[in-house]
Image (spheres, helix red, strand yellow):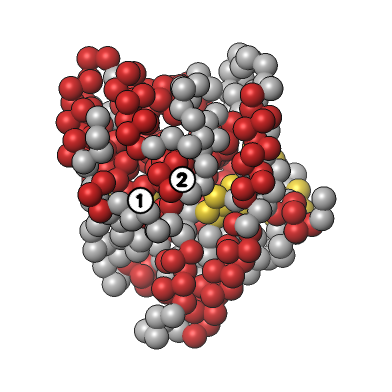
Amino acid sequence: MTSTDRRCSANGGCCFIVPLNVLRTYAGDPNLDPQVRMKLQETFVETGRLKTFREAGRVAAVAFRRSLAPALAPAEVRQQVFDCRNGHSLPGQAIADPGGAADAAAKTVYEVTGKVAQFYRSLLHRNSVDNQGLELVSSIHYRRNFDNAFWNGQQMVYGDGDGRLFGEFYNSPDVIGHELTHGVTQYESGLRYEGESGALNESISDVFGAVFNQWLNGWTADQPAGWLIGAGIIADKEKQTGKTCLRDMLKPAADHCISPQPDSYANFDPTADVHYNSGITNRAFALFAQAAGGKSWERAIEVWYAASTDKRLSSEATFAQFAALTLDAAGELKSRLKEAWQTVKVPV
Ligand SMILES: [Zn+2]
């Protein structure tokens, strides 16, 4: 395997938090400093290049997943954190004691990644992303001012951001939860990263990332902050322009989103990036969790976990097929869930 393959290959390929169209739009924004635009352009080119490795990885992952033995008992998940020192070789230099490191990035990534594993273990009885106790590997300080974070099929990778539009990508717990959930999806349904299945793949990552963040902060489903994706990665200067997040699951089309999305299946765009159409199913989950009441991680997330790990969920699944599986798992919440799917106009 060449060093290029190592960056974005193995079982699932690369899944980024910031979509290509956002990087391209801001790289062309004449109101931004030329240095910042250059960083966005570099990230755009690198993200596009890494994405091309994905499909082969997905096919291999589905084959691998089917060969797995039943899950072992949940246990403490092992972790490693590496420092890329602004280079592009992965994983980079091992950090001996990331939990006690002076570098805030190492410490935060180590602690929050451990919390994601705890979230999956204690609430959903899952033993790491593969349900087999896979060691979680993270690399920080990837390239210089890199404007993205991604799961490359084997590990997590975080950029430091350009400082004007985006800050450090490890600063949003939901982003860490989102990316690790791409690993979970890779070992479960292997949802194909295009069209409706691709949007579902993205949406499932947003759902588990957001609910993880709510759990971490003790927020109930009616608190709007818990539905923002990437609130912690928006740089202060960008916040002054009124942008507060990458996406808002409750209000996908709102002006405060850097990457606005459709909020109804009536506006599904078959030509759009998977991060665009995911707004539709994101909103269905947020509406459902609010209708269920209380904390999203107590009941609503169990329904989504049951559906997203259901053996009947094919890698080519449509929104309607996924919705049917959620309804199967909803029990006494079925009528409230049905209403949420109807609000976003997904046929159920
Ligand atoms: Zn993603």
Q: In terms of depth relative to the viewer, which is nearer, 296 or 78?
A: 296
Name the quarter where the C terminus is drawn: top left
Circle 2 crowding by C-alpha within 10 Å: few under 14, some 14–19, many from 20: many
How many marks can you see?
2
Q: Which mark is residue 47?
A: none
Disc 1 designates what residue? Answer: 277
Q: In terms of depth relative to the viewer, which is nearer, 231 or 41?
A: 41
Q: Residue at x 64, y 39 (%)?
A: 59
Q: Residue at x 48, y 54 (%)?
A: 17
Q: Is residue 265 left or right of residue 230?
A: left
Disc 2 designates what residue? Answer: 198
Q: Is 188 rendered above or below residue 278?
A: above
Q: Is 299 rendered above or below residue 8?
A: above
Q: Is 340 rendered above or below residue 68?
A: below
Circles 2 and 1, Cβ within 8 Å, touching? The answer is: yes
Q: Is residue 204 left or right of residue 343?
A: right
Q: Residue 256, position in %: x, y?
A: 26, 62
